[in-house]
Image: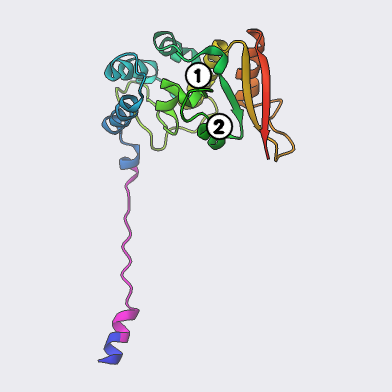
Amino acid sequence: PELSSLSAGLLLLAVVVVVPPATLLSPRTSQFRATFRQKCQAFPETSQSCSVLLSMFEEAYVGKDPCNFPDEAYHPLFVENPFIHSCDKTMFWSDTKDLVHQFCKGRNHFVSLENSLLGNIMDGLTWCGKKSSKDTFFYLCEKCDINTVSSFWVRASAEFADYACGNASVLLNGAISKPFDPTSGAFYLQERLQCCATCCTWNCGSCS
């Protein structure tokens, strides 16, 4: 009995779940819509029906090539759903996302892009469309530098910076030698340059 128990203990049953490529490539429209609506409805300052907002969002990318995707396609979203916080409470960040989100959690003093309606909904999500398809995909979207997700954040950053006025605050990571990359990154390319064009005064802080 002891030997039998030992032998049984040495038998390992390996269960391997093989996910067919077709499953990964299949659309996840219903799942994406459910997540979008859930995050939208949880936001306390939704200015319109979440279904209307979702429809507008889908119009930007569904049925279109996900690569070389123009950020201008998302512009109508921000026209119809403008930022509503006090423009001089705008908070930018670079390499301090988690800290900034904790700092802005109540949205009473400072507001980051991810604290806004569209920024909050899309934060952490991946999505893409495919040419001639009415569906949304988020597994194995084509790998390209300019895509539906990156273009959304480019447009969102530009709109956010354009909205800022007065004293614009930024929280940088003082523990690294280069708190922000002067040649790349959304903070420099979109937010800082756009905000300079609107005559903001910068309040810089750092954490280390």
SS class, disc 2: helix
Residue 56, image x and y in percent? 34, 14
Residues shaded magenta: 6-21
The image quarter in which residue 195 lies = top right
Q: Is residue 54 visible?
A: yes
Tell me the quarter of the image containing the C terminus. Answer: top right
Q: Amino acid at mark 1?
A: Ala
Left or right of 193, for residue 104: left
Magenta-drawn stretch contains 33: no
Residue 156: assigned label:
1
The image quarter in which residue 169 lies = top right
Magenta-drawn stretch contains 19: yes
Residue 152, image x and y in percent? 48, 21
Q: Residues within 10 Å of mark 1 (few under 14, many from 20)?
A: many
Relative height, residue 184 to residue 95 (above, below): above
Near-viewer residue (103 or 58): 103
Whether label 2 touches label 1, CB < 8 Å: no
x 74%, y 38%: residue:
177
Residue that carries the numbered disc 2 in the rendered image? 100
SS class, disc 1: helix
N-terminal-most mark, 2 or 1: 2
In the displayed orientation, state which residue is furthest to the front.
108
